[in-house]
Structures are given as C-alpha cells and as structure tokens.
Image: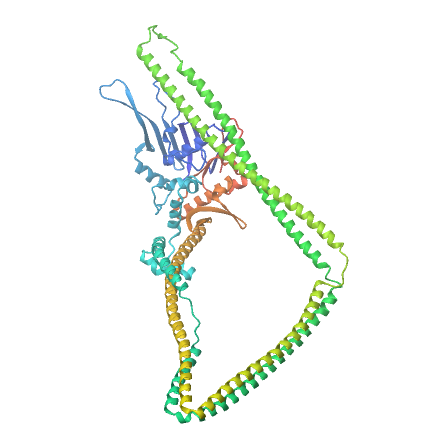
Amino acid sequence: MKIKKIIIDNFRNVEHEEVDCKHLTIWKGKNELGKSNRLNAIVFLLIGKVLTDKYGVGENDIESVLCNKRDDRGRRAECKVQAIFENGQTISRVYKEQWVKKRGSLEAIYEGNVTELYNNDSVINQSEWVDLINQLFEIKECKFKHKDLNIIQAYLDPLYLFQKTDYKVLRALLESLVGDVTMDDIIASEPTCALAKEEILKYSGDAAKARTGVNKVITDKATGLDSKITQIEAQLEVLPSLPYDEEKYKKLSDEAFNYQLNIKNIKNNPNSAVAELKAKKDAIRAEYDAKADAKIKEITIEKSTIQNDYTTSLSELNAKLLASQKKDLTERKNEPLIKAQSELQVLVQQRYELDAKSNNAKATYEGLKNKYTILSSEVEFVKTKIVTLKSELANVAAREPEIQVCPHCGGVLNDQFITDFKNKRSKDVEDIKMNINSYEKQNAENQTKINAITADAQTNADNYRALIAKRDNLDAQIETKKAEIENIKLIPFEPKSDLTKELEVKLQSLQRNYEKKNAELAAARDIALKAINDERTHKLTQIESDLQMAEINQATYIEAQVREQEKALEAVNTELEVLIQAKTQNAAREAKIKELERIQHERNEKQALYDAINLYIQTEIKLVNSKCYDATGIKFVMLEDQFNGGLKEVCYPVYTDGNLEIPFSNCSTSRKLIIGCQMIHSLKTLIGSNDLPVMVDRCEALDDEHLKMLGDEQMFITQVSNDEKIITIQED
C-alpha cells in the first residue's frame, strides 16, 4: 500500500509540514534548511532510526530528533511523524520527554525520553508495530536473519547494504536469497575439485575448515619431512653414484672363471701345454689380422662419409652465396633503416603510454585539490560557527530576569520564579556548550582529512613529476633515433653485404676442414694399424718365448703359467671388487632416492589436496557470484587475491565499463545510487515487498535521465539547490 500523506511535527528543525505524497517527492533547497531532516523523519517513523546526511556512516541518535522548541517550563515539544495511506489508515510515531512527579514531591523530574506508537488512534507495542509495517507494505518474511541486518532499512536506503553493512552479512544474505551451490554443482563445473570431495566431507561439507585442516597437516608434517629430505640429500652427497657396467661385470666374472679353470687344467694336464701354446699362437695371428681388416674398413667408411658431407655442404653454401650476392644490390641497404624505424615506433608508443599515465596523475591531483578546497571552506564555516556560539554563550550566561514585579498585580516576583529563570539559563548554557563541543570535534576531523589529502596530493605530484621526466627522456631518445635514421640514409652503397662476406669465409673454412679431416683420418689409420701390428708382435714374441720354455723345461713352464694365470685372476678379482662395491653403493643410493621420492610424493599429495580445496572454494564462490548476478543483475566480487598468494573472501558490487571493473567504493554518486536501487528492486522481487518507499539523500548528482533509472518504487528524494526555501516537487 502506498503512502498518501506525511505529517511532520517538531522533528529537528521541521516544526510542521504536511506533504501529499505521489510517486516521486523531491525536496530542493540550500544546505541546512532541513531537507535531510524531512527524509529522516520518514525513516524515523518506519523503523525508529535516523540516518546521517552523508552515506556510509549511519547512526541511531534518536534523541537528536527533538527540536529546540520549549514550553514555559523548559520542556521540549514532542516530536511526531504520521503517515496516512491510500485506504485512510494512519500510523504515528511520537518521541517525547518523560517528566514524572514523585510521591511527596512538588516538581516533576525528567527521566529520559519515551516512544509511543499508534495505529490510527490506538497505542500499540513494538512487536505489533513490526507486524503492522509488514502488513501495510506487504513485506514477506526474509529467511535470512542477522542481528546486524535491518531488512526494512535495506528496502529504504539504496546504500545501506553496500556502505553500512558488514560484507559478511551481505555475503550471507546473497547466498540465502540465490540458493545453495551443491558439491555436485562445483565438481561438475571444475572436475579437478573431485580430489577434494572426500576430505571436505570429513568436515561436514565445510570447505574452509577442510582447507584449514589440510594446511595444518602440511604445516605439522613440513618440519619433519623437510628434516628427512635434508638428511637424505646430505647422505646422497656423501654417497655418490659410482660407474657400474653390468656387461663388464659379467665379462670379468667369466674371465675369472676361465682363469680358475686354466689353472686347474694346467695343473691336471701338463702334457697339453705345448699344444695349447701353438694353438694360442695361431689364434693371435688370426685375431689381429681381423682387427687390421676391420680398422681399414672402418676408416674407409668414415672417409666416404666425410666426402659426402663436404659435397652437400659445398653445394648449399654456393647456393646461399649466389643468392646473397644477388640481394646485395637491392635489399641489404634497407635493413638498418627498417630496424631504426621499428625502434623509433617503439619509442613513440612508449611516449603515448607515458602521456596517458601523466594525464591520469594530473587528473587525480586536480581531484584532490578540489577536495582540499571544499574541506577548507567547511573548516572556515565551522570556525565562524564556533565564534558565533561562544558569543551567544557569553550573552546567555550574563542574562538576568527582565522584570522583577508582576505586571498584573504589581507584586514582587517570588524566589521560585528567579530560580526557574536561573535553571533555564543554566540549561541554555549547557546546550550551547554541547553545540560548541560538537563543532570543535567536527573541526578536528576536517583538519585530519585535510592533512591526509595534502599528503596524497604531494605523493601524486611527485609521481607526476617523475612521469614528466621520463617523458622528456623519451623525447630526447626519439630525436636521437630520428637523427640516426637520417644518417643511415646518407650511408654510401657497398655491393658486398656482411652475409656474403660471412658465406665466403664459411666456404673457405669448409675446404680447410675437409682437407684437415682427410689428413687426420690418414694419420689415425697409420697409427691404428701400427698399434695393432705392434700388439700382435708383442704377444707373438711372448708366446714364442713361452713355447721355447715349455719345450725345454716343461715343469718350469707349467709353474710360470700357473703364476701368470693367478696374477691375471688377481687383477680381474680386483676389478670385480670395485664393480661389486659400486653395485652395492648404487643400490643403497637408489633406495635413498626412492625414499626421497616417496616423502616428496607424500607432500605433493597433501599440497595437491590443498590446491583442490582452494579451487573448490574459488569455484563455489564463482558459482554463487553467477547466481547473484542472475538474480540481481549486479556483478559482485566475492574473492580477492592477496600479495602472499592467499585468497580473501569479500563481497561488494562492481560497475562494468567495457573490460574495466570499477569497485562500488570508487563509483560516482549517481552510479552508486543506481546500483543501490537495482539491489532494492531485486530484494523486492526475491523476498517480496511492493510498496516500501525508497529514500535517497543528496540526489543532485543525478540528471533527469539517471533519475528515471532509479526504479519504479515510491521515492522520497533530496537535492541541494540555490533555493532560499525548500521547494517540494511531486510527480505521478
């Protein structure tokens, strides 16, 4: 149901006013005339609160609604605000001083202030009043309830939820309105979150508690695991990997077995020694003949490869050289010019970017300068007000009764009259002192703001000067680069480019390398064949010596052969011991590495779980945010990245301008009001309330076009203007 009429009596500086309300009611006029008081009177009527003139603060200073008008006993007039609805029903809220005459006392005593609530002419209590407001405005019950949330005030004040409500309360309200996001919804959106499902369920679905629990596990284990990792890494440093060849190990094992077998055969078959030596001699000849043939074949193949590589490279280089020589006549001279022009373009782009940054810095400085001017004017006003009040205080303190005798009977006025006059004078003095203290407090607050603005302006000015210096430096670089381009244009033509010269050098180097490799290959062949022949001659000489000895003195020969085999066996065993030690050490090292990998894997698993829970939380917030936008038409920021890599839960609306997102706190006054009214409209749609009016204070920032964007609800608006008296404008 719509409000048809508002009646205000003795509310602050509004002594009496009756307003016939239509769809839109606007109060316009200069500051201090009482525009905001008329708006606050309606708020006071509906919810028993008053709002400050500036958004974002909000207070419950109910006592301030009483005006300064007093009767002849010094008692303040009662404050009364009424609303008459379309059906004729009237609701009233009265706020007044309570004076009580105690038993046995001749004078009434002030005992504070009281509130009286009326439905038509009937007095009702607070609970009945709430039910009445809900009924009149068709307010549906909000499932979400919180001690710090006044849902009716959220309907009345477009900026209440965003500037006067804790973000946690706003966040909880949004989540209750748009519905829950289930675990299945989150996992469907981000399948990676499935890793966190089991862990989150351990905490009854509370992802934040799960993240805290996993993080505690990671933290608690980190010290012990890090200590183990450090210990293992230290052990690995003193336990290096040793070279081990399994094939060599098998070969040496076979050799050791053969030496042992030879020793046994020599001792058991002394007559076979001569025949064995002759067979060994023939085997050595055949072995080294085969080695010589293999080496010759190897070198022949390598020589053929070198020849093929040389032929291919020579062909490629000649082709490149010919192409380069052709290009020298046309393109080469343009390369440094193109490069310099490209570098000039980069410098010019940097100059444009610096211009943009310096312009932004200048604009910020001008904004701070305007704020400083406004606050300075306010400081001067407050100072003047303090001087005026102090003068008034002196006059009131010195005031004496104007008459000493009664004008009717001629009798001398009694002491009671004098006492009452002095009491009233004392009360007036105290009131003026309170006003002086209030203005002095305001003056101190304004001075603090001026100091902060001055510091910010200085910082911004320093930044601007630094940007100008960078710009000047870039200007110098640009001029230098332009001069470089002109100089390049004057360079005389040279037919041979650096590339051509480089290719000619490579061609010469290719020929030299080819000749060098051929020479090295021939030398290597001669050296290898000589080494093979020398080794064969040496072994055959040794065999011949052994054969002669065997034939002359078989017993001595056998003994020498046994010693030789034993010596060879010892050498093989020595090598085997080294390989066995390497195998054992490498196995121990591998075990340490596997243990290290296991520990690191354990940590990685916990970290992966923690990351999955973080992603779960982010996805949940993203889905909730999406639901909020679908339900309200307003984009909310629910999560912010921190410098330490963590995440901070927040809740505030943003205005999207292209790719730019502007936080609510940085929006213009008009945009804040539009967003706030959009939120009120969404609340009424989601919860249900058709007729609650909207209160907008200081709406002069909105032009007619933006004013129409505030919604189709009944509205009460104030606008600052130059009008000497308050003008009331009403529109259907």
Front residue of 15 and 391: 391
Q: How many marks?
A: 0
Residue 628: give x, y in percent of width and height: 43, 51
Residue at the far top in the pictured view: 410
Q: Is residue 692 visible?
A: no
Q: Judge from the rendering whether residue 326 lies leftward or rightward of residue 424; answer left or right.
A: right
Up/down of 552 relative to 246, above or below: below
Residue 230 falls in which quadrant of the image? bottom left
Q: Is residue 697 visible?
A: yes
> Image quadrant for the N terminus?
top left
Residue 415: give x, y in percent of width and height: 31, 10
Front residue of 177 and 453: 453
Residue 690: give x, y in percent of width and height: 41, 43
Residue 105 falls in which quadrant of the image? top left
Q: How is the image coloured?
A: rainbow
Residue 355: give x, y in percent of width and height: 62, 44
Up/down of 11 relative to 412, above or below: below
Front residue of 619 and 550: 550
Q: Residue at x 65, y 74 (%)?
A: 516
Residue at the far right in the pictured view: 492
Q: Judge from the rendering whether residue 519 lies leftward or rightward of residue 652; answer left or right.
A: right
Residue at the far left in the pictured view: 104
Up/down of 701 relative to 567, above or below: above
Q: Judge from the rendering whether residue 435 lies leftward or rightward of residue 291; answer left or right.
A: left
Up/down of 703 relative to 477, above or below: above
